[in-house]
Image: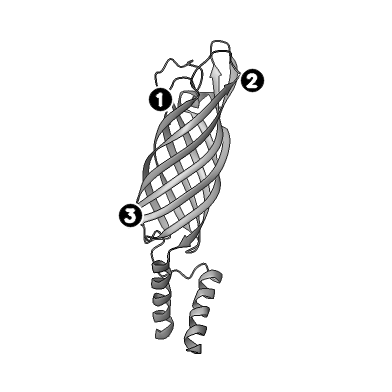
């Protein structure tokens, strides 16, 4: 019994201390990831005006089943836009809460490309270049629809880096105070995220059993 306890403890220690020791799928069902990251926001209408703005936030990832994941992002950022008539630059602050469903293409690999779609609620606050809020009255809450592609790169069973790009379609034209004359505006976001993973009990049990078999065969 003492030998069994010692062996189980050794296996768990190896899991924590040796990132390259991977035996099961990286996006296996039951993995919950929590992390943080940075983003780069850009109005689609203003790509040629070179007005990218930075942001960041926290993110979650849960592998509901093989090839299917649930992801979330809670973040803040800015959209830079140009009033071409007045030749003035402006900024819109955005606070968002987004929920996604992803299709994991290579869930058993340390390099997992994925596709995702989702929706989110935002609060936005346009300001001019002097930080002055416009006098016009309008609803500053909105629902956005999102879609994009990304890739998860796993350093171990417990740590990953994710790079993704997405397009968001708003239900308002007030992100830039209606300057583009569109009924719905578009903006893009590029994300760099780092995530730490937790596991449910069945996953840990299977992981220990697999490592014990490998340990016994040596």
Label 1 SS: loop
Q: Residue furthest top?
A: 85
Q: Residue at x 64, y 18 (%)?
A: 132
Closest to the camera, between mark 1 and mark 2, is 1
Q: Which residue is the site of mark 2? A: 129
Label 1, label 2: how far apart the Cα atoms are: 25 Å
> Which comes sooner in the sequence, label 3 or label 2?
3
Q: Which residue is the site of mark 1? A: 171
User: Residue 57 at x, y = what percent?
Assistant: 55, 43
User: Residue 105 at x, y = what percent?
Assistant: 34, 53
Q: Residue at x 46, y 17 (%)?
A: 180
Q: Residues within 10 Å of mark 1 (few under 14, many from 20)?
A: some
Label 2 SS: loop
Q: Quadrant of residue 183?
A: top left
Q: Please tell me the numbered disc located at residue 67.
A: 3
User: Residue 101 at x, y = what percent?
Assistant: 36, 45
> Which comes sooner in the sequence, label 1 or label 2?
2
Q: Residues within 10 Å of mark 2 (few under 14, many from 20)?
A: few
User: Residue 84 at x, y = what percent?
Assistant: 53, 14
Label 3 SS: loop
Say whether marks 1 and 2 touch (CB < 8 Å): no
Label 3, label 2: how far apart the Cα atoms are: 45 Å
105 vs 42: above or below? below
196 vs 55: above or below? below
Figure colour scheme: one colour
> Which comes sooner in the sequence, label 1 or label 3?
3
Say whether marks 1 and 3 touch (CB < 8 Å): no
Label 1, label 3: how far apart the Cα atoms are: 30 Å
Q: Is residue 200 left or right of residue 89?
A: left
60 vs 177: above or below? below
Q: Quadrant of residue 203?
A: bottom left
Say whether marks 3 and 2 touch (CB < 8 Å): no
């Amino acid at each position: 019994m003492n030998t069994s306890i010692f062996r189980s403890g050794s296996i768990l220690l190896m899991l924590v201390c040796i990132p390259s020791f991977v035996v099961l799928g990286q996006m296996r069902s039951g993995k919950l990831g929590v992390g943080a990251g940075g983003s780069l926001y850009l109005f689609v209408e203003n790509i040629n005006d070179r007005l990218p703005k930075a942001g960041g936030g926290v993110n979650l990832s849960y592998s509901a089943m093989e090839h299917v994941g649930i992801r979330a992002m809670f973040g803040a950022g800015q959209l830079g836009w140009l009033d071409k008539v007045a030749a003035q630059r402006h900024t819109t602050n955005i606070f968002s809460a987004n929920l996604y469903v992803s299709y994991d293409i290579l869930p058993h690999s340390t390099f997992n490309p994925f596709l995702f779609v989702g929706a989110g609620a935002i609060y936005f606050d346009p300001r001019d270049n002097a930080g002055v809020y416009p006098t016009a009255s309008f609803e500053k809450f909105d629902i956005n629809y999102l879609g994009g592609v990304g890739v998860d790169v796993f350093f171990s069973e417990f740590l990953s880096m994710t790079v993704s790009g997405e397009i968001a379609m708003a239900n308002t034209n007030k992100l830039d105070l209606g300057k583009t004359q569109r009924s719905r505006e578009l903006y893009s976001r590029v994300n760099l995220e780092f995530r730490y993973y937790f596991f449910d009990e069945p996953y840990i049990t299977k992981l220990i059993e697999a490592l014990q078999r490998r340990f016994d065969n040596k």
